[in-house]
Image (cartoon, rainbow, N blue to C red):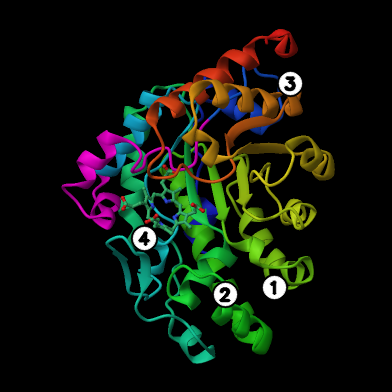
Amino acid sequence: MSETTLTAKTPALTEELRESPFMRACRREPVPYTPVWLMRQAGRYMPEYREVRARHTFLEMCKKPEVASEVTVYAAHRLNVDAAIIFADILLILEPMGLDLEFAKGEGPAIHNPVRDARDVGRLREVEDAGALEYVYEAIRITRRELRPHIPLIGFAGAPFTVASYMIEGGGSKNYVHAKRLMYTDAGAWHALMSLISRALVGYLNAQVAAGAQAVQLFDSWVGALGPDDYREFVLPHTRSVIERITPGVPVLHFGTGTAALLELMREAGGDVIGLDWRVRLDEAWARLGDVAVMGNFDSVALFTNPEVVRRRARQILEQAAGRPGHIFNLGHGILPETPVENVLALVEAVHELSSNKSLESEV
Ligand code: CP3
């Protein structure tokens, strides 16, 4: 572990932040209303985002702290959500590790020199304190100053499997043929790669905390491609090693999609809050997980309806949570680009209103 990691400090949590509904829910304490935030809340569905985006490439936006901060703060305030997430990307860490990253127009991310075998793994750079990602830490410092003082800021990174799968596939993938081939044929190279990524993630996440993030989220967006035995052997020890080394006292949100068969194992890997996608019932998933907070799990596609349907479906999720401490409302995955803003606003309002009204059932 690097010196930076060992000495990383949690910036003094103000009373306001510590007692905010989001932070209380992370600790499974009672809240006056269910806190809500939305993955990809600062994104293309929002006209103000598209306006800024028209003047910069996506990577430029990430690398200009004032711009990243502006869109982070704007989205959180506009939506009236209970937490902000720093505008960045899970793939930024690939650059200091020696990979050539591009977000090609309309085609999603591309890595031009993907990692395919043990030799490629050997060429990757160790990123001890992720100093090359200083622009993210600066964006966090600015955002912490600009955000309302009671709104926590979430830092984030990809989880080791999801980061590794991008490195190996060279972009998005349907079947993860390259990633699984490396995993199944050269376990040594696989574990070496996952360890290298995990060390980088620890430094990166703790530096985000030191810069002013109150919580961190690990996105294991593609881990649902694995069955439980492979998760246990090839992923769990690495994800756990990251979560264990996060600055003590900082809540960790551990999110994945397609994870219905993996929830208990994700719990074993760690996290104070387990993120659920929309394919599971929240109450059943929570029963399986036990004593941990949960986040989710509204279907992003249901935002393409109207405020009445949105409200009805939000209520169904709140009813499953049944007012138990430790529920953070979110989508089951990110907001999609064409989503009508008015339905997003209606969702946040519905969650606040319905959850502060103790008699959920009495409303027609
Ligand atoms: O949630 C937020 O508002 C914070 C910002 C954020 C972004 N990416 C901004 C972004 C976060 C938390 C992410 C995480 C991320 N990035 C994930 C995990 C979350 C998930 O969705 O599962 C993944 C898999 C990525 C990788 C990534 N970044 C992809 C696949 C793409 C292309 C998506 C597409 O549809 O083109 C991106 C680009 C990206 N990251 C955009 C945004 C707002 C769109 C960029 C643009 O404006 O063109």
Label 4: how many Cα within 10 Å (few below 14, some 14–19, many 20+): some
Q: Amino acid at mark 2?
A: Tyr
Whether the residue under disc 3 has CB within 8 Å of ligand 1: no
**Which residue is the site of mark 1?**
234
Label 2: how many Cα within 10 Å (few below 14, some 14–19, many 20+): some
In percent of width and height, residue 351 lies at: 58, 21
Circle nearer the viewer, 2 or 1: 2
Dots 1, 4 in contact, CB < 8 A: no
SS class of the residue under badge 3?
A: loop
194 horizontally vs 326: left or right: left
Dots 4, 3 in contact, CB < 8 A: no
Q: Which residues are magenta?
A: 37-66
Dots 4, 2 in contact, CB < 8 A: no
Q: Amino acid at mark 4?
A: Gly
One can see residue 150 in this view = yes
In the image, 344 versus 304, the foreground residue is 304
